[in-house]
Image (cartoon, helix red, strand yellow):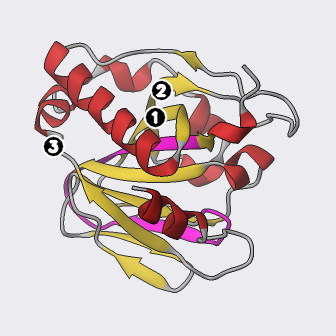
Amino acid sequence: MKKIWNYINMLDQKNSKWSIKQICLFDISLIQKEISNYTYEWDLDLTRQKEFKTHKDTKMYQLQYMDYAWKEGTSPKTETVNSLKTDGAKNQLLGIYNKLEEIYESRVVRVELIKMNANSRIAKHTDASSMLYIARRIHIPIITNQHVYFTVHDNTINMQEGIAYEINNYLAHEVINDGEQDRVHLIIDLFPESYFHD
């Protein structure tokens, strides 16, 4: 495991042009089954699409929150906002958290389920905050299709369901969903253990 972490740790976001790294595969079948039935959950918090024009064609179901305006030098603060509903889905999600925290020697600090509308686009942008530059950002497709294209810098891929990908969000990135199906990603941000002062 240390070998994996050393490799990942070398992927310095600011000083290299790495774009997307495939990390590992997870069983997401029960999470997928639950999310497929969500309706009102997508309308509980509309701040993402209202505050960020880039994300106008997306909806968020937030599970864990950490403020993007976190100040370096302070211990990260995180809170649970919502949870998955079925025990099976909760257990699968916990397994994902545990594995990623082990790989990255980090703690999960922010988690969102993001639904992107069919036939829509997230315009090219970079993420701008100290929190996002330090965090390792993982995307796990929960529901997707062969017509979703995720581009980071000059690398475009069709991410596959259940596979965890780390993206270098310091670089410009965009997403195109040319499919007739909404796409749902689980986005997990992890902070290195060294930033916590407890």
Question: For the residues marked 3 and 2, what is the alpha-carbon distance in whole angstroms?
Answer: 21 Å
Instruction: Please give left or right for residue 50 compared with residue 42 in the image.
Output: right
Mark 1 or mark 2: name the one nearer the start of the chain: 2
Mark 1 or mark 3: name the one nearer the start of the chain: 3
**Residue 96 appears in view:** yes
**Is disc 2 surrounded by few (<14), some (14 to 19) or many (20+) residues within 10 Å?**
many
Q: Which quadrant holds the N terminus? A: bottom left
Check disc 2 and report the residue beneath it: 62
The amino acid marked with disc number 1 is Glu
Q: Which quadrant holds the C terminus? A: top right
Measuring from the top left, give residue 44's x and y in whole percent.
46, 17
Element at label 3: loop
Q: Is residue 95 shown in magenta?
A: no
The amino acid marked with disc number 3 is Asp
- Boundaries of the magenta span: 169-190
Instruction: Please give left or right for residue 197 compared with residue 148 in the image.
Output: right
Question: For the residues marked 1 and 2, what is the alpha-carbon distance in whole angstroms?
Answer: 4 Å
Who's the residue at 62% across and 82% down the image?
Answer: 17
Who's the residue at 23% across and 70% down the image?
Answer: 147
Measuring from the top left, give residue 73's x and y in whole percent.
88, 36
Q: Nearer the viewer, residue 9 or 46?
A: 9
**Closer to the observer: label 1 or label 3?**
3
Whether 46 is drawn above or below 21: the answer is above
Q: Using the image, tell me which numbered label, if any, was put on residue 112.
A: 1
Whether 144 is drawn above or below 64: the answer is below
Mark 3 or mark 2: name the one nearer the start of the chain: 3
The amino acid marked with disc number 2 is Gln
Check disc 3 and report the residue beneath it: 27
